[in-house]
Amino acid sequence: MSNPGTVSAVKGFRDVLPDESRRWRVLEDAAESVFGRYGFGEVRLPVLERTELFARSLGETTDIVEKEMYSFADRDETLVTLRPEATAGVVRAYLEGGLVQADPTARLFYRGPMFRRERPQRGRYRQFYQIGVEVLGRDDALVDAELLVMLDRYLTEVGTRDVRLELNSLGDATCRPVYRERLREFGTAHLAALCPDCHRRLEKNPLRILDCKVEGCRRVVADAPVMLDSLCAACRTHFDEVRRLLDQEGIAYGVNPRLVRGLDYYCRTAFELIGAGLGAQNAVGGGGRYDGLVAALGGPDVPGVGFALGVERLAMVTPGAEAVAAGPMAVVLPLDARGVGPALRIATRLRDQHVAVGLEPAGRSLKALLRAADRRRARLAVIIGDDELQAGRATVRDLARHEDRRHALPLDAPGPELATAVRALAEGGS
Ligand code: AMP
């Protein structure tokens, strides 16, 4: 029979193996704990939503909706999409789950996979993970500042390094249309130097020319008018207040007047977290205010603000989360078939007592078994050979100190006694 070969993962989709997973858990657990202190509760949302949800919330002219969504017709012809981001889903859940009546100022956090059909490269995948938060029902500068303080505390707690916060204001329904026209006039005057994509953007959504990656466009845009110079009085007051509160709390940030967020519904406060050493895909997270979104999705006129962090990239700039996993406290080694039953019994009793224990199959030399225990980074080896079976007591080897304690562990002792003995041996006692 010919070997059919292995099946690889789909391009841009990757596995998160146990070592990486463990690091992610550190990031997720800290998020739950820090965000919890700020009053956030977790929502678990479906990964599949109606396509319409994203078409209505993200804006028809965003890159995501235009070319990056995984959309298909379900068997009943419903058009569905693997979520490219979670804000729209959070808002849908807030409306559909009745939170809007019960708790109009909801604070929600989420974690989970997102899907975008982008060109895969380092730090960019087609399935990637986000941790994010949304506050609904608050339009004050205080809550914007509070979110950024929380983000700062979270990053400090997990030990993130070399990131900087960039801040901007995108204006609102009063001042942005005026600015948009100024920008369109500017772009039209420099049409020849702009890429074909930007020609299209100028017509549909001129703000998007500000984050075009094409070199020629970047040169033109460097001299473009900026939103910050066109803010209306209310937006100016809001922005100044956010900055004042951040300064009061000593949160470092830079104002980047060219920062725009990819999605249409952002207004006023917008920010991005940039990782210094990350290369092209250097945005570790981003967020901002989206006061029109809830209404755009059919709800009442409720404002919102939030952010999302990319877990893959966050892990890259968080060395603390690199800590190697500790191995099991002990690995039980039956030397031959007769030791198998007692080995399982001892392992099960220790595991019942919350001791992490490995268990190796019988039939290899002691040397090979000890090598296996070392590979697992175990602290102790519990050896069950003929001699031990006869004595009714296992020999325990301290793998770090290379010391044997012959017949140290009674094979038939109850779990708590075994656990106490193993813990003491692992500490180096008797
Ligand atoms: P966005 O909603 O586009 O602002 O994304 C928020 C964060 O998610 C970004 O700052 C990245 O850290 C992360 N992210 C977005 N797209 C991808 C991707 N294709 N692969 C990996 N991470 C991503």
Image: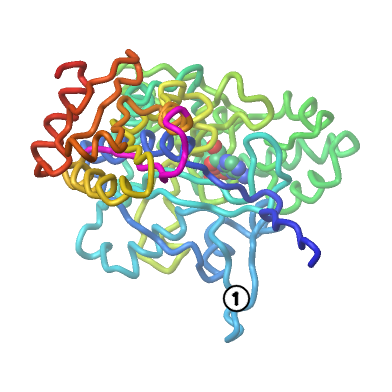
- List x then y, in percent, for residue 329: 28, 31
For the C terminus, which image quadrant? top left
User: Among all residues in the image, which is located at the extreme right?
Assistant: 192
| 268 to 167, vertically: above or below | below
Residue 358 belongs to the span the image colors magenta: yes
Of residue 150 and residue 140, the one placed in the foreground of this image is 150
Disc 1 crowd rating (10 Å Cα; few below 14, some 14-19, many 20+) is some
**Segment colored magenta:** 355-367
Q: Is residue 51 left or right of residue 238?
A: right
Which color scheme is applied? rainbow
Kindly indicate the quadrant of the structure image that contains residue 97.
bottom left
Is 105 rendered above or below residue 289? below
Residue 338 at x, y percent in the picture:
32, 48
Q: At numbered mark 1, what does the secondary structure look like: helix, strand or loop?
A: strand
Residue 217's x, y, as percent?
80, 32
Residue located beneath label 1 in the image: 79
Q: For the N terminus, give its image quadrant.
A: bottom right
- Give the residue at x 77% y 61%: 3
Taking the magenta stretch, the answer to whether it contains residue 48 is no
Residue plotted at (58% across, 86% down) = 76
Quadrant of ligand 1: it is top right
Q: How many marks?
A: 1
Q: Which one is nearer the viewer's eye here, 238 or 97?
A: 97
Residue 333 falls left or right of residue 308: left
Which residue is nearer to you in this view: 115 or 401? Answer: 401
* Residue occupying the point 59% across, 64% down: 55
Amino acid under disc 1? Leu
Q: Against 215, is 412 above or below?
A: below
- Dominant SS type (magenta): loop
